[in-house]
Image (spheres, rainbow, N blue to C red):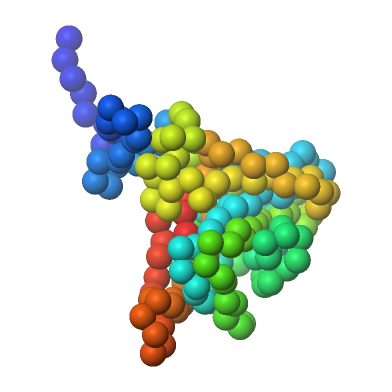
Amino acid sequence: TGWVKDLDTLPCFALQYDDGNYYRVGPILPVSNLSYYTINTGTTPDEVALAFQVPFACKVDGLWAFVELDGDADLVLYDSDGSTSLASVSLDSNIRTTVAMCPLFVPLSTEVTLSINTEYYVSIKPTTATSIHVKYGDVASTAIMAAMPGGDSLVCAERTDAGAWTKINTRRPFLGVSISALDDGVGGGGVSRARIVNAGGI
């Protein structure tokens, strides 16, 4: 009989043009489902990652995850082969300040340089049998993923027992990196202290 406002809900939509491409409207994200992984050392999968590329050479100085850290875990930045660790940080569940799911940022002891248009993985993997929860968002199609910040070069990957990664191209886990410097392609040095952080992206 009447409309009731829900202050905790955002609209979910994207515009599709007659060329078949989708475009997001302002800050609205076309995420049709928000949920989370529950993983530990005995689950399948037991590791979740953001497979991503950057459109410029850059350096990163930190990793982040939207997680409920009931147990210990590692945040790992892998090279393009998906198995060589470029940086790793151990997370002790005692560091958390709340039992709820929340964003967690950890700095790296040394900056890591990433190459342009090269795939990397930033993952979280539990190190005990106690489950952790990792937030993710789903979209309805790969075409809609292209309308997300960062486009379809930022997607979910999961694996078990350090095996092969399986990608889910319509899902984006809330994992990422902190970009501390980037090459603007002009020469004479790069731009420093750049930060790129978005919902479920870099």
Expressed as whole percent of the image width and height from the top left, the position of residue 57 reads 50, 73
71 in relation to 190, above or below = above
What residue occupies the far top of the structure in this picture?
Answer: 1
Expressed as whole percent of the image width and height from the top left, the position of residue 6 reads 27, 31
Viewer-closest of 38 and 143: 143
Name the residue rendered at 59%, 45% in the picture.
Answer: 156
Q: Number of marks in the image?
A: 0
What residue occupies the far bottom of the structure in this picture?
Answer: 188
Q: Is residue 194 left or right of residue 1?
A: right
Which quadrant is the N terminus positioned in?
A: top left
Name the residue rendered at 56%, 67% in the picture.
Answer: 63
What residue occupies the far left of the structure in this picture?
Answer: 2
Q: Is residue 169 visible?
A: yes
Q: Is residue 47 left or right of residue 28?
A: right
Viewer-closest of 72 and 144: 144
Q: Is residue 20 left or right of residue 83?
A: left
Name the residue rendered at 25%, 41% in the picture.
Answer: 25
Viewer-closest of 69 and 157: 157
Expressed as whole percent of the image width and height from the top left, the position of residue 61 reads 53, 76
Q: Is residue 192 visible?
A: no
94 in relation to 70, above or below = below
Name the residue rendered at 40%, 70% in the picture.
Answer: 195
Q: Is residue 63 left or right of residue 179?
A: right
Expressed as whole percent of the image width and height from the top left, the position of residue 17 reads 27, 30
Viewer-closest of 104 and 177: 177
